[in-house]
Image (spheres, helix red, strand yellow):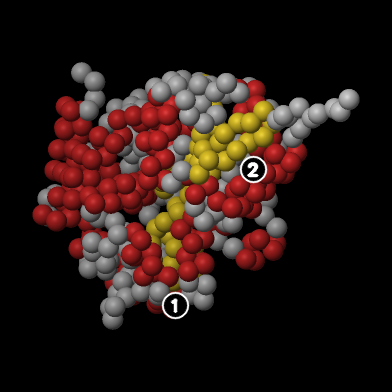
Amino acid sequence: MHAFAAEKEVITFAASPFSSARGPQLQDWVKKFNDSQENIEVTPIAIPFASFANTMFTQMGGKGGPDLVRFDLYDFYPAVAANLIMPIDGIIEDEASLRPVDKYLKVDGKRYGIAFEISNYALIYNKALLKDGKVPTNFAEFIASAKAASGDGVYGFAYRATMAESGGFWQDVCNFVYGFGGRWSDDSGKLTLNSPEVVAGIAAYKQVYDLDVTPKGADAATFRRMFSQGKVAMEIDNSAVMASLMVKGPDLPIEVARSPFPTDAQGFVLSPITVNANTKHKEAALAFLKWMMLPESQRALETAYGGSSFVATPVAYTEEELAKRPWLKVYDSDKAVSIPQLVSGHEIKTPEIQRIVLEQVVKVLQTDLDPQAAMDEAQKMAEGRVLPK
């Protein structure tokens, strides 16, 4: 008689990066798990970012969908509220080893995800376009540098300022607001859209807009391309963008520094891996998560990102890695001051609050509405339209 090997238990893992330029490297990383297992195999599912969230909510809402799902934080909280993902407490032996941003993956004291990808924000600059190659270290210097670098087809800075790119517009506004010490709500969840610190951040956004140092109306794809062509001196963006710029403009003297605001706080991108509440393969899914948290697996995952993102636990860089990507340390140093681009205590309501805020910011930019008056109106509208009575 012949002995036949038992078939492996197959589970599925959906993530939008599987369909990106990093897809092959990430799928090779998954293969490392498959090669190490006798009884479990993970099948990556590539779904483009633009349709990912809708696809997942439709499938999971219908009691189907992949066993493992990488959500962006923006969709993570609605998925938790809809009971689409299950608590996964007790699978991480040393939670103290996790990055500080891990706290955002617990809801009501229960863990619902583990950081799969983290991208922090910082100031990216073209040293050749700044006076004496000097990076600004405060907002006054930043304004002066942006003005000095602008002219002859070159812009000192670039950011988003239109509702056509509301998602990215919100990210950019968050960075200014957080950098000036503002938060969208306080520790009790009370909205603080019109606090002095938030208003200061919006006023700074307006100040930059009025200087004519930005390519107004340009979307992110356009101004990032302009940066890679040496036509933009500075932008505040995440580590994934920096990695991409290094590929597109390898000969440019691009460097990274902390954002030039009064405080170090900035937004960040956090994408957790979660377990579908409908899975019929819970133990196999948890086995993959436990493997993912092994030190060698964490390092291999961060290597697969190619410097574009960080993982759940800090990974020590080799001298060779830092020589190739010296900006990694700058982005990594922001981990303790990274704040979600969400309204704390009202994460599920963030899209509605975001729209109200951005519509008021557009009025500030385009009609010279006073920032304080604009944010007073935003506070009033959000309290009246969005928050529960």
Q: Which mark is residue 176?
A: none
Q: Quadrant of residue 385?
A: top left
State the CA–CA distance, disc 2 to disc 1: 41 Å
Pointer 1: residues within 10 angstroms few (<14), some, or many (20+)?
A: some
Q: Quadrant of residue 34?
A: top right
Q: Is residue 344 left or right of residue 104?
A: left
Where does residue 362 sit, x and y in percent of width and height?
18, 51
Residue in the image at 27% along x and 63% along y:
218
- Return the residue at label 1: 128
- In the image, is residue 274 above or below residue 303? above
Q: Is residue 337 visible?
A: no
Above or below, comparing residue 164 to residue 55 in the picture: below
Within 10 Å of the Cα at label 2, are there few (<14), some (14-19), or many (20+) other Cα atoms?
many
Q: Residue furthest right?
A: 1
Residue drawn at 40 percent across, 24 percent down: 61
Q: Residue at x 75, y 38 (%)?
A: 36
Residue 313 seen anywhere in this rendered image of the structure: yes
**Secondary structure type for disc 2:** helix
Residues under numbered marks 2 and 1 in contact, where contact means CB atoms less than 8 Å apart: no
Q: Is residue 57 above or below residue 162?
A: above
Residue type, label 2? Val
SS under mark 1: helix
Please identify the residue farthest to the top as the structure is shown: 389
Which residue corresponds to the image point at 32% horizontal and 46% vertical from the top-left? 167
Q: Mark 1 belongs to which amino acid?
A: Ala
The quadrant of the image that shows the N terminus is top right
**Residue 183 in picture, x, y percent from top left:** 33, 39
Dot 2 or dot 1, earlier in sequence: 2
Name the residue nearer the viewer: 274 or 358: 274
For marks 2 and 1, give the one nearer the viewer: 2
Q: How many marks?
A: 2
**Label at residue 30:** 2
